[in-house]
Amino acid sequence: MEPSNDTTDLAAALRAAVRGTVDFGTAARALTTMDASNYRRVPVGVVAPRDAGDVAAALAVCAEHGAPVVARGGGTSIAGQATGTGVVLDFTRFMNGVLEVDPGARTAVVQPGVVCDALRAAAAPYGLTFGPDPSTHSRCTVGGMIGNNACGSHSVAWGTTADNVRALEVLTYRGESARLERGGVGVPEGLRRGVDALVSGRLALLRTGYPELPRRISGYALDELLPEKGRDWARAFTGSEGTLGVLTAATVRLVEAPGARALAVLGYADESAAAEAAPGLLGYGPLTVEGMAADLVPSAVARAALPPGGAWLFVEAGGADAGEAESAARALVRAAGDASTGARVVTDAREQRVLWRVREDASGTATRMPDGGEAWPGWEDCAVPPERLGGYLREFRGLLRDHGLRGAPYGHFGDGCIHIRIDFDLLTREGVGRFREFSGELADLVVAHGGSLSGEHGDGLARAELLPRMYGSELVGVFGEFKDLWDPDGGLNPGVLARPARLDEQLRFAGMPEKGAVPVAFAYPRDGGDFSAAVRRCVGVAKCRETVAGAEVMCPSYRATGEEMHSTRGRARLLHEMLVGDVVTDGWRSAEVRDALDLCLSCKGCRSDCPVGVDMATYKAEFLHQHYAGRLRPAAHYALGRLPEWLRAAAALRAAPVLNAGARVGPFAALAKRLAGVAPERPVPPLAARPFTRRRPRRAEGGRPVVLFPDTFTNYLSPEAGEAAAVVLADAGLRPVVPPRAVCCGLTYVTTGQLGRARAVMRRTLDRLAPAVDAGLPVTVLEPPCAAALRTDLPELLPDDPRAGRLADGVRTFAETLEEYAPGWEPPRVDRPVAGQTHCHQHAVLGDAADRRLRERAGLAGDLAAGCCGLAGNFGFERGHYEVSVACAEEVLLPSVRSAAPGAVLLADGYSCRTQIGQLGGGRARHLAEVLAEGLAEAGRVR
């Protein structure tokens, strides 16, 4: 079914009928063209229904206008079934609640848009959990899990989603309501009679046509309607990928959560050896049997946490308490015996989370090969009987070699289900042809091993065309009849499962510019200088859509607004559509892209937290540079983006006292903020009466010289941090050398997209620091975002200047300088608890390991808040950003400050973080250097 050409009438009718939101605008359509697959289908509009009544009203309108409908949850589907050409129903905005938890019955009633982790959190107070947990559990929805029959790492213990569904409330395309459960009492009479007749007429085929294995997800589960299986309509519907009906509510089973867990990590020579060992561990009742080869494990993690081997099994054991869980894990180690190359049992919860993050991020990290090449889904989750997995993997590797392809298998070895991203060339006709040929041969290999083309994510657009190879044409014909009984108009997710589209059509790469066709300012070294390749990094796994702050930064604006357009993925999708040009049609001048990037804080959290390393801060700077080329900019770009120039002028004129006094006069301050594009709610920070470069710290006698970088913020706004750092470095036996004039990293120009000026500023800085850089002196930068800019933005904007790379290599944080160049120095013992903020750029670019070790040696106990403070340089000062800025601060930072132990030291090395804490009532935070300098003074060590 194709949508009506007259979308204006369709949109108007939907707005009249639906209480939720109806959006047929460019941005809404662009945001939903793709999921986490290789496919792209452009919808005509997006509807976010408020309740089942809204769903029924939307379906009635769509049926009247002949518009197809596709239900969408978190959009993390890997086979393309969450894309569509008609009307997308977005359940995440309103229909996202847990309606009831019944601990006695161990069930929950949920709406389709509820996130898996939200359901698990609601069940946790009762000692219960929802068993299925895909690696996207922090953002995928239960409705999507039911659509795909999702599984996750704990399926060896708790089964697939179908095993955990009790009853479903659905609506057909024609608006009939049905309650699906065992027996089919709640199914409309006509549908029930038709399906019963279909099943009764094909009993032999349905009893013999399905392979027996734990992860058989492909096709329709018509065998669940056999009389000996209790005619379970809910199980038969699960995995139908939105092609039969639209889910409005689900009753799901909950399972008892173990009181404690321990992780047995078992090493093997390679993934085939690990796969062959996996079935032998199932008899010990593990919660998981997950496999991963060395290609997907970061070397640092491998060295620190994994036993010897080329591949590993992550085998989780549960118990009533920690001792019982550990005992069960050690029994698994003994069961592995000599087949294992090494083993360890991990009981610490934090260390377990680190290891599980490696596994869960694999769907993203696997998209980049070790040499930087791109790899894609398409054969992400085929499954074979577990006892045949080892042999299958060996033949699979051989098939890859035959086609000149590469990939790193990982996944649910205990269930025989393999995930892999393969370096298909999906950009050229020849490459797409090879993709098609390989897909057919791999389908035959899977079938030869008694397997399923899909073992978790569904068939979608990626594999449905190949279902006859698995099931035969007769059974696939029955699938078509089943679809027609439910949806005779073909209005629900056409092209998926029944009468599928070709697997090499509708690929999302069609229309993207060729390499080098988009002139850009940054070098994009990780993407071969290709902006299109940089944008393609986003494969849609949507880790940026996590709704609960954890130990990471990405993506604070999404958590503040809940809007897809303010997630890293949403922004990347809009940039993709801008490059393709048929939805977003005005290129770099796009207002839709500009508006989506407006609330990007440039925190760089995605650079480290996104599994594929999307760097939206850089993409935003590039876009603003191109968008405003030859045009008038917002006032804040001139006032805040060029802040170093204004501060330098104020210092030259000795105007700080006058300006500070003026900022305290209400009408004058209000007018100045209005003209400068500054948020009226923001107090203007005071300027230092005397810049740091004029204070000239006491010269240490002897000692190794280190450059103490007088960045704009330290020099003009917080010189006390610079003075304190000089004191500490001197006490450590180093000789801090401060350039006589302020130098600038160019950060404020970068974040506002004034990249021409940024380059000029950076070149001036290189000129001024050239003697020190040529002498190989370390450059200590107190302000984390300035250090990050010198490490990353500088060489990426000046790739042809060899001095840029040398300076970047020489940059050290304050703590890194002390650890590397004064390893024997003993800091003063402060012995107080701490609270405060690790700067988001330090988290994303620099790392804070040296800081944590320095704090520990000084007796500063406790962790600093993760996340972003919300001020983020110019962002929180710009008009229109105040509410989001405060929301970001209220997420983690301010609650941690308010709950700090009595006498706690407030630490924040970033000037923005200190300002945010101070302006929002959290107290006075200081740079670590200030706290240590004060400790030296109290200990009598400052002369």
Image (cartoon, rainbow, N blue to C red):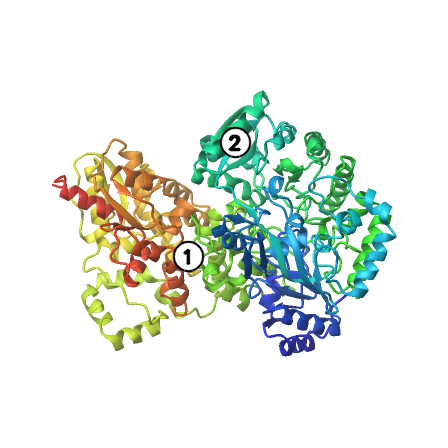
- The residue depicted at 21 percent of the width and 59 percent of the height is 688
Q: Residue 138 appears at what percent x and percent y?
A: 53, 51
Q: Which amino acid, by three-letter code, is at mark 2?
A: Ala
Q: Residue 527 appears at what percent x and percent y?
A: 55, 46
Front residue of this view, candidates 208 and 413: 208
Front residue of this view, candidates 872 and 629: 872
Q: Residues within 10 Å of mark 2 (few under 14, many from 20)?
A: many
Q: Residue 931 appears at what percent x and percent y?
A: 22, 47
- Closer to the chain start, of discs 2 and 1, is 2
Quarter of the image that includes the N terminus = bottom right
Quarter residue 233 falls in:
bottom right
Q: Which mark is residue 328?
A: 2
Q: Which amino acid, by three-letter code, is at mark 1?
A: Val
Q: Residues within 10 Å of mark 1 (few under 14, many from 20)?
A: many
Find numbered disc 1 in the image and state the secondary structure of the residue it sits on: helix
- The residue depicted at 32 percent of the width and 68 percent of the height is 682
Residue receiving disc 1: 750
Q: Which mark is residue 798?
A: none
Q: Considering only vertical position in the picture, is 43 above or below 253?
A: below
- For residue 616, side relative to residue 56 (left or right): left
- For residue 935, side relative to residue 97 (left or right): left
Front residue of this view, candidates 213 and 518: 213
What whole-number distance in Å separates the C-alpha atoms at marks 2 and 1?
54 Å
Find numbered disc 2 in the image and state the secondary structure of the residue it sits on: helix
The mark closer to the camera, 2 or 1, is 2
